[in-house]
Image (spheres, rainbow, N blue to C red):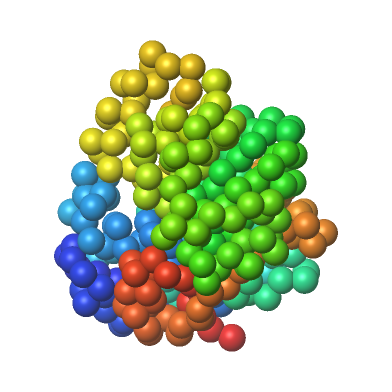
């Protein structure tokens, strides 16, 4: 099969487009013929070696955390899916989706909502799961809460703004660049702050929940903006910020937590229901063919994409 792969850590130039072995599904897995995938910050962080203590030195590695396509084969214990079904989801581990074929655990896969294209479906899993689990589970969002989303126009942030509304937030503030303010308002934000001109950390005791979807701030910098018993959730902070914040959080009424999204099947089913009902929608910033994944990585690293960067793999 054709795939994007790299044989050592480094910049986007280490990505190759070429032949790799087609994976074989285990008993509880489905093999998906990939029609579309995506690029997320986790992909270029893995490629750059930022997470090599977790990802190790086994090469080649195929990046990609979002899969949308049709079932090509199923493992012997799979009962929910059969060849030809339209499915999407997030693979185990930290990659494998940027290829013509990819594996999904049966429990983590979901049927693509009828109203979504494969490209739209590929924009969903990691971003929506991260936003949902950050707000509901780590952030313990309560009805009426004042919520701030830092990075509200990004791949995770665009879902977080919508999901904060669905989960009952009383006031939603989105932080983004000026070019994306109208997009964020259209997704449901009550207030939009221009991060070039307005510093949310100076809004003292305003927020019940701050979700830093782009890990650009820190708990220590944001703490003063939280109300008593407020919660700060981040995705991938700098190790020094995580260590210092975790220590201070222990002795404070304002708590910090970090999230690594889980490919939890019931959450995918809930997200699918919202998508089918039109209550949630993916935002696609740019689309690239699979062979141009390196260029897609560069765009993601620049941090200027409004929504998700999608890779088209096959028709």
Residue at 23% across, 61% down: 48
- Classify residue 189 by image quadrant: bottom right
Check the image and report above or below for 228 versus 2: above
Residue lying farthest to the top in this orientation: 251
| Image-based side of 240 in relation to 44, left or right | left
Observer-nearest residue: 250 or 309?
A: 250
Tell me the quadrant of the picture where the C terminus can be found.
bottom right
Residue at 62% across, 61% down: 184
Find residue 215 and report its horizontal and vertical position in percent. Answer: 39, 48
Check the image and report above or below for 263 versus 10: above
| Image-based side of 231 in relation to 5, left or right | right
Find residue 152 and report its horizontal and vertical position in percent. Answer: 54, 56
Observer-nearest residue: 228 or 57?
A: 228
Residue 303 seen from this side: yes
Tell me the quadrant of the picture where the N terminus can be found.
bottom left
Observer-nearest residue: 162 or 37?
A: 162
Residue at 24% across, 65% down: 60
């Amino acid at each position: 099969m054709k795939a994007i792969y790299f044989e050592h850590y480094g910049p986007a130039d280490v990505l190759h487009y070429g032949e790799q072995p087609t994976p074989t599904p285990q008993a509880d897995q489905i093999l998906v013929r990939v029609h579309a995938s995506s690029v997320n910050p986790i992909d270029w962080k893995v490629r750059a070696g930022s997470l090599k203590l977790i990802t190790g030195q086994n090469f080649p590695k195929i990046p990609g955390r979002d899969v949308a396509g049709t079932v090509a084969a199923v493992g012997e214990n799979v009962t929910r899916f059969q060849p030809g079904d339209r499915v999407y989801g997030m693979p185990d581990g930290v990659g494998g989706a940027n290829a013509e074929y990819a594996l999904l655990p049966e429990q983590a896969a979901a049927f693509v909502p009828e109203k979504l294209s494969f490209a739209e479906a590929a924009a969903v899993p990691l971003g929506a799961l991260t936003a949902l689990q950050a707000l509901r589970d780590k952030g313990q969002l309560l009805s009426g809460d004042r919520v701030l989303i830092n990075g509200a126009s990004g791949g995770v942030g665009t879902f977080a703004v919508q999901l904060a509304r669905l989960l009952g937030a009383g006031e939603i503030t989105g932080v983004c660049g000026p070019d994306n303010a109208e997009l964020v308002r259209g997704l449901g934000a009550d207030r939009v702050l221009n991060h070039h001109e307005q510093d949310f950390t100076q809004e003292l005791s305003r927020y019940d929940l701050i979700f830093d979807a782009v890990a650009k701030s820190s708990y220590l910098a944001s703490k003063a903006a939280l109300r008593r018993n407020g919660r700060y959730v981040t995705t991938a902070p700098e190790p020094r910020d995580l260590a210092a914040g975790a220590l201070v959080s222990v002795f404070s009424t304002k708590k910090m937590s970090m999230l690594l999204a889980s490919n939890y099947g019931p959450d995918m089913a809930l997200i699918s229901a919202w998508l089918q009902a039109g209550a949630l929608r993916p935002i696609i910033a740019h689309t690239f063919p699979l062979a141009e994944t390196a260029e897609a990585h560069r765009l993601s690293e620049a941090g200027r994409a409004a929504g998700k960067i999608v890779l088209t793999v096959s028709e």
